[in-house]
Amino acid sequence: MNIYGNLSYSDSSTINCPSVNKFSIFISFSFRGDDNFFLLSLMEILSSPNSMELTSLWLVLSLRPPFLEVSSPFSVLFETERLPLPTLPILLLPFRFVWSETSTAMVVKKKSISSASPWTEKGKYSKTNEIHYSFLKPQLRHALLLCFLLSVWFVILRCFLLSSSTSENNIEKLNVDEKAPKTTSKSSAISKCEGGMSVYLYDMPAEFNKGLLKDCSHLNPYTDMCPHVANRGLGQPLSYMAESAVATTWFATHQFIAEMIFHARMENHPCRVLDPINAKLFYVPFYGGLDASSKFHDANLTARDELAVRLADYLRSKPWWERHHGKDHFLVLGRTAWDFLRRNNNFGNSLLNLPDVQNMSVLTVERNPWDRVHNQHGIPYPSYFHPYTSHEMMTWQNKMSQSSRPHLFSFIGGPRRGVEKAAVRDELIRQCSESGRCKLLKCGKGPSKCHYPIEVLKVMSQSQFCLQAPGDSFTRRSTFDSVLAGCIPVFFSPHTVYTQYEWFFPAGDAREYSVYIDENALKTGNGSKRVVSIEEELFKIEREQVERMRSAVINLMPRLTYAHPNATDLGFQDAVDVALEALWAKRLKLNV
C-alpha cells in the first residue's frame, strides 16, 4: 500500500496518513534560517509490527538554511558554518518521481513488486510520467537505500565544507579590507622613485660593515650579538608569533641594530641605482654603532677612533664625494648620537666630530637636540614586526584596533641609578604599583619578562596608555613598541619624541597621538602642593578622544616600521622610505 500525505510549506510538515499496514519512510529536508544546522529527519511510520515491507519513500524539501540532524531510529549531529546551503542534486534511480505543483512536496514512490522479478522498466511514457523499477530482493533494496542515503549525506557535507572554507576566507579578507585602519603612509612617489630620486649604495670594504660581524660575540661588552646580527640584522625568528612558517615577519630584533636593517633594505630598494653617475643621493653603509660598542671599554682613544678616521679618508678619495663635498651623502647609525660625540676623553668615539662626517646627513636613533651643525636626524628604533606586504601590515593594524584593553595604563621598565632621570622612573614605578588601573612589568638584572617580545606586546596591547619615561638617554625603543601595540604613549620629556623624529611623527598638535606630563610635575619639592597623579590625568580624558588618539597611533605604524629586507612589493612607506623621501627633499632644498 502506498502512503500519501498533506505537506505544508512551513517550518514543520504536517502529514496525515490513513490506516496502513505497510512500512514507509518519510525523509524531510527542513531548513531553518535561525539555526546553524541542517535537519535531516527519518520518520518511520509503522502500523503493523508484523509487516516490515518498504512501500514508499517521501522526500520533502522546504528551502530555508542550515541544520543537519538525523533522528529516529538513530541520531547524528553535524554542525556547519553560517553559510547558504548549495543546491542539492538528488539521484534516485530505483524510484519513480511524482511532482505536485500545488504543494512543496516531491513524492518518490515505488510499487510493491515481487522480489523474484528481474530489473525491468515499465510504463516509461505513461500519463503520469512515472518510472517503474523492480528489485531482486528486499535485502538488496534496503542496502541500496542505505548506500544512497549515506552518499547524499557525504555529498552534502563535502559541499558544506568546501563552501565554508572558500566563503570564510573571502569573508575574512573582506573584513580585513573594510575594518583595517587606513594607513597614512603612501606608496606612490617613493616606491616608484618618481621625481628623479635615485640612491647609490657604496660598495664599501668589508672592514666598514659586514667584516665586523665575523667577531660578533665581541661587538657589545654587555651581550653576545651573534644571535642579533643574524638574518641581516633582524635577529632570531619568533616562531610562536609567526602566522606563516615559510616567511615569518616577527623577529627578536635588537634595539641598536637599525644600521644593518637599513643596509639590507637598501640593497633591494627600488630607488637604488648601480651607476653613481645617475645617483642623486649616496648611501654609506657603515656599521658605526657596532664598531663603537665593540670598543666602549678600550682605554686607547686612538683605537676607538681608528675605523671612523679611515672611513673619512676612504670617502674623500672618491670622485662622487668631491662633487658636493659630501652634502649629498648620508650614513645610518644604530646607536644614539652620544656614543659618537666623545667629550673630555670619556665615553664613545669622535665620529660625529669629524669635519667630513659633519658635511653628511647622519641618521641615528637619537639625535642631539642641541645639534648646531643640523646634520643629525632621528630615525625609529627597530621593533619586532617586519612585514612583507601592506596586507600583513593592515591585518596587524586591524588586530590592534580591536584589541581589548582592560588596563588604563602600564609601565614596562626598571629603576635607574646615578642619573637625573632616576627620580622620574622611581615615581612611575611607585604610582603604577599602587594603582588598580595600571599594569607594571618591572625590568631588572637577571631573567625578566621584559626580554620576551610576546610579554612586552601583551602588556601594551592590553593597555590604553603606555608610560614612556626617559632611560639612560632621552629616547627608548619602548616608544615604538607601544605604537606597534596600538598603545597611546605618555611622554615626560619633549626630547623623547617631539624634538627627535620630525620626519616620522605628525608636525601638528602632539596631543592628537600622545599625552605629555612634564617630568618636573612628578618630582617632590617642585613648588607644587603634591605630585601629579598620572591615573587622574589619564582617566579624565574623554573616551571619544582616546579612540581618536588610538586611531592616530595605529595609523603611524607603517612609517615607524622597518619592512622585511626581502620585500619586493611592499605597498606602503616604511621607515626607510620615509627617511629617503626626507633626504631627497633636503637635497632639493640645499640645491646640490
Image: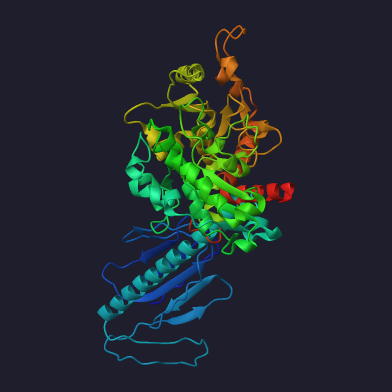
- Which is nearer the eye, 544 or 251? 251
Residue 393 visible (yes or no): yes
Residue 238 visible (yes or no): no
Residue depicted at 50% across the width and 60% down the height: 169
Residue depicted at 60% across the width and 33% down the height: 497
Q: Could you tell me how many numbered marks the image carries?
A: 0
In the rendered image, residue 198, in percent from the top left (x then y), is placed at: 63, 59
- Which is nearer the eye, 322 or 61? 322
Residue depicted at 46% across the width and 29% down the height: 347
For residue 71, which quarter of the picture? Answer: bottom left
Give left or right: position of 309 versus 177. Answer: left
Judge whether 454 appears above or below 38 on screen: above
In the rendered image, residue 390, in percent from the top left (x then y), is placed at: 56, 55
In the rendered image, residue 147, in percent from the top left (x then y), is placed at: 32, 75
For residue 144, which quarter of the picture? Answer: bottom left
Image quadrant occupied by the N terminus:
bottom left
- Which is nearer the eye, 540 or 502? 502
Look at the image and name its color scheme. rainbow
- Which is nearer the eye, 525 or 278? 278
In the rendered image, residue 175, in percent from the top left (x then y), is placed at: 57, 53
Judge whether 258 appears above or below 60 on screen: above
Give left or right: position of 295 versus 325. Answer: left
Judge whether 44 appears above or below 326 on screen: below
Judge whether 456 appears above or below 78 on screen: above
